[in-house]
């Protein structure tokens, strides 16, 4: 199958699940957006192996098209600590960190540009199903400051660590800062337990959770410096130039 044929197959199956039908958009970009939106709104439910085989081939080809970045491609800012601006779903490291919500099954807003949405999109529908299984076993929402680990499925990394950061309402409190530091400690400990030697952190809580970026960066760097296992390489992954500059000033 070509990528076009895979995309058509996946869109058709997801529309059929919703008892919908319609003409396929003309452009590849519009088709990608439609497929992503359908994956984003799909509930955590089993699906046929034929779908998964096509989806896995499609997503891995899409990742290869974007280009993969490896730890060896990066230069440390100080021993064991790296700074990289780019797409975390294209990092081929042992594990990446997802800034999740307390439901832990991803972002259901079609095409939303949050990291939770991006990771679930490019990992494939299996990730939402696995997260839902973990949450069903737990029987309650994920507490702030803790973490879960799952396979990464179609991402180029091995694992995804999901952590729920604090939501800031008004002024940042000491408890907000302690909870954010707890996210970094929980991820480092869980990664070490699972043999992770290279771990990429996103900027936890600094998006829709409204934690001030400068204070979040300081907490991230200080906590990782204090709790990073000596055999673990840590990458601070940032999306914006503003965050890159904040971390650059703190590192090295």
Image: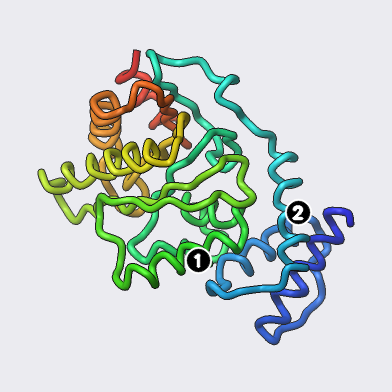
Q: Residues within 10 Å of mark 1 (few under 14, many from 20)?
A: few
Q: Is residue 201 above or below residue 130?
A: above
Q: Please tell me whether residue 3 is drawn above or below residue 89 in the rendered image.
A: below
Q: Residue at x 69, y 64 (%)?
A: 35
**Depth check: 195 or 164 in front?**
195
Q: Residue at x 32, y 54 (%)?
A: 164
Question: Quarter-wise, where is residue 121 in the image?
Answer: bottom right
Picture quarter with the N terminus: bottom right
Q: Quadrant of residue 53?
A: bottom right
Number of other residues with Cα within 10 Å of mark 2, as a class: few under 14, some 14 to 19, many 20 or more: many
The residue where tag 1 is placed is: 109
Q: Is residue 115 left or right of residue 53?
A: left
Q: Position of residue 12 (x, y in %)?
A: 77, 74
Q: Are marks 2 and 1 in contact (CB under 8 Å)?
A: no
Left or right of 178, for residue 216 = right
Looking at marks 2 and 1 on the same chain, the residue that comes earlier in the sequence is marked by: 2
Q: Is residue 65 left or right of residue 116?
A: right
Question: At which x and y percent is residue 21?
Answer: 76, 82
Does residue 25 appear left or right of residue 44 in this picture? right
Q: CA distance from mark 2 to mark 1?
A: 22 Å
- 177 in relation to 41, above or below: above
- Name the residue beneath numbered marker 2: 58
Which mark lies nearer to you, 2 or 1?
A: 2
Disc sitting over residue 22 in the figure:
none
Question: Where is residue 165 drawn, in percent x and y?
Answer: 29, 50
Q: Quick one: which residue is furthest to the bottom in this view? A: 19
Label 2: element kind: helix
Find numbered disc 1 in the image and state the secondary structure of the residue it sits on.
Answer: loop
Quarter of the image where one finds residue 66: top right
Q: Hey, which residue is sitting farthest left in the picture?
A: 174
């Amino acid at each position: 199958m070509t990528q076009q044929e895979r995309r058509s197959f996946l869109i058709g199956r997801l529309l059929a699940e919703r008892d919908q039908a319609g003409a396929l958009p003309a452009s590849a970009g519009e088709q990608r957006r439609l497929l992503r939106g359908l994956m984003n709104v799909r509930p955590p439910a089993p699906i046929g192996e034929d779908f998964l085989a096509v989806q896995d081939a499609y997503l891995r080809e899409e990742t290869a098209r974007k280009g993969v970045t490896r730890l060896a491609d990066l230069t440390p800012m100080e021993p064991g600590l790296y700074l990289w601006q780019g797409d975390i779903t294209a990092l081929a490291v042992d594990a990446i960190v997802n800034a999740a919500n307390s439901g832990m099954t991803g972002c259901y807003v079609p095409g939303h540009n949050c990291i939770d949405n991006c990771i679930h999109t490019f990992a494939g529908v299996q990730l939402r199903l696995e997260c839902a299984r973990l949450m069903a076993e737990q029987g309650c929402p994920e507490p702030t400051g803790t973490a879960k680990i799952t396979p990464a499925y179609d991402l180029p990394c091995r694992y995804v660590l999901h952590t729920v950061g604090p939501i800031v309402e008004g002024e940042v409190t000491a408890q907000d800062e302690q909870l954010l530091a707890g996210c970094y400690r929980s991820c480092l400990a869980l990664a070490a337990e699972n043999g992770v030697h290279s771990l990429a952190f996103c900027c936890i809580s600094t998006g829709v959770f409204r934690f001030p970026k400068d204070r979040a960066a300081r907490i991230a760097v200080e906590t990782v410096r204090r709790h990073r296992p000596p055999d673990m390489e840590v990458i601070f992954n940032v999306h914006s130039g503003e965050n890159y500059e904040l971390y650059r000033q703190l590192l090295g």
